[in-house]
Amino acid sequence: MIEEVSCPFAENLEVYYEDRSGETIYGYIKFICDEYVTVCINKGKYRVSDCCLLFYPNQWDQLIPVVSKRNQ
């Protein structure tokens, strides 16, 4: 049985994460569903040209709200 995890994010929330090379990538939550969230890291001229990444529930701990960094 798969444990259902409640998503701790909201759409339009600014977040960041560190990629494998250690670079900090900033974006915002664009879409949320039970299976994943999308993080838009580059907004294009048209919606179809936005660059978004999928984060599955087992990866949500990698996403950090930007306000957390500003409060440090």
Image (cartoon, rainbow, N blue to C red):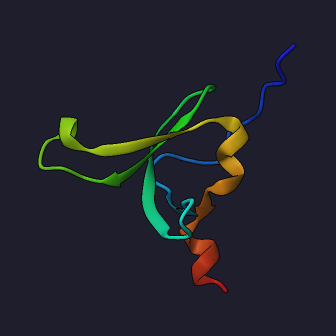
Q: Which residue in the rendered view is the most extreme toward the front? A: 21
Q: Is residue 2 above or below residue 52?
A: above
For the image, the number of numbered tags is 0
Where residue 22 appears, x then y in whole percent?
56, 70
**The C terminus is located in which quarter?**
bottom right
Q: Is residue 63 above or below residue 30?
A: below
Q: Is residue 68 left or right of 45 when viewed as pictured?
A: right
Q: Residue at x 54, y 60 (%)?
A: 19
Q: Is residue 29 left or right of 17 when viewed as pictured?
A: left
Q: Residue at x 61, y 26 (%)?
A: 35
Q: Is residue 44 left or right of 11 when viewed as pictured?
A: left
Where residue 69 appears, x then y in whole percent?
60, 78
Q: Residue at x 18, y 50 (%)?
A: 44
Q: Is residue 4 above or below residue 56?
A: above
Where residue 21 appears, x then y in whole percent?
53, 65
**The N terminus is located in which quarter?**
top right
Q: Which residue in the rendered view is the most extreme toward the left? A: 45
- Quadrant of residue 36 in the image? top right
- Quadrant of residue 47 in the image? top left
Q: Which residue in the rendered view is the most extreme toward the bottom? A: 72
Q: Nearer the viewer, residue 63 or 19?
A: 19
Q: Which residue in the rendered view is the most extreme toward the right? A: 1
Q: Residue at x 82, y 18 (%)?
A: 2
